[in-house]
Image (cartoon, grey):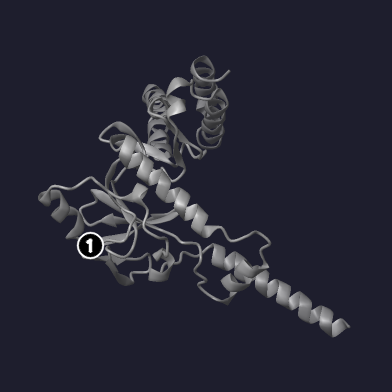
Amino acid sequence: MKFLKFVSTVLILVLAYGFFFQSKQEFFSLDLIQTSLPYNDKWENTHELAKEQYDSIFHQEYTYFGKGACAVSFQSKDQKYVIKFFKNGEVNSNWLSYIKKHLSFKKDDSHLKMIKTFDGYANAICYDKENSALVYVSLNPQEKKLPTIKIVDHLGKSFLINLNTIPFVVQYKVAIFKDELNACLAAGKIDLAKKKIEQIFSLYKEQYGKGLYDEGEGILKNNGFYQENPIHFDVSKLTFDPKFREQVYPQKKIDLFAHKIIHWVNKRHPHYKKDLTEFLKANYLE
């Protein structure tokens, strides 16, 4: 009995360490971004690129830039563009991942999540291309239309990506909202920080007036600026409904966003919390 307890304890510790260690690691493979989703008319891209921009985007190397819940991003060599590949959620990088997945009681809904993500980007390029910094969207399989590009992951490993078979989007490289806010407050530019906050809130309301609503809550990390203009670049949870155009943006969501900003400021720049809290209360909070 003691031996069984010892073995069980060791196994639990090994698994716990493995889960913790793996959670700290980045992982990329071609299998991670493959999909078996069928063709969808809604995802078809009707936006064509001028030859000069096409060559500029697809005839250069991309290196690892970052990852989110839905996608892995790579930055172009000229640092003008970011290409996103979507994670299918089905890849097991090692035996720990396999065990972790099969111990879960939650039904695997990776395909449903990917469909919703694709819908979000399709909505963005169809109804609000400029405010999402989208340059090119390819969510359906292509017929020898696109080139093969070289990408380099965070470990320096190179991959050749056939863009005809793997879904992706290209966006202009955006300065993330929280980084911009941090730079403003670090430099004591409180008025500029307030202006940027106003720009982001105005962007959400503008999108709502177009029938677009973001179900996500990441105001600080899902938005940014491109050439001083506010950008909503993570549109993976963007939904479209014409009825939104006739409605006022939900105050509950505005309150949530405002409190997220206050919480972030309190952690990063507590000496500005009072000023920015008063600003948000006067203009957004109810």
Task: Give the left or right position of residue 187, taking residue 253 as reference.
Answer: left
| On screen, residue 178 above or below 76 | above
| On screen, residue 16 above or below 118 | below
The spot of residue 193 in percent (x, y) is 40, 27
> Which residue is nearer to you in this view: 41 or 82?
41
Task: Give the left or right position of residue 109, taking residue 124 as reference.
Answer: right
Q: Residues within 10 Å of mark 1 (few under 14, many from 20)?
A: some
> Which residue is nearer to you in this view: 238 or 99?
238
Residue in the picture at 29% in, 31% down: 229
User: The residue under label 1 is which amino acid type?
Assistant: Glu
Which quadrant of the rendered structure holds the N terminus? bottom right
The spot of residue 153 in percent (x, y) is 35, 66
Task: Give the left or right position of residue 131, taking residue 89 as reference.
Answer: left
Which residue matches tag 1?
Answer: 61
Q: Is residue 156 visible?
A: yes
The image quarter containing residue 206 is: top left
The spot of residue 183 in percent (x, y) is 38, 36
The spot of residue 53 in percent (x, y) is 15, 49
> Which residue is nearer to you in this view: 276 or 81?
81
- Which residue, as the protein is rendered here, is positioned at the far left? 52
Count of marks placed on residues: 1
- Which residue, as the protein is rendered here, is positioned at the far right? 1
The image quarter containing residue 262 is: top right
Q: Is residue 234 visible?
A: no
Residue in the picture at 46% in, 26% down: 243
Which quadrant of the rendered structure holds the C terminus? top right
Task: Name the element at disc 1.
Answer: loop
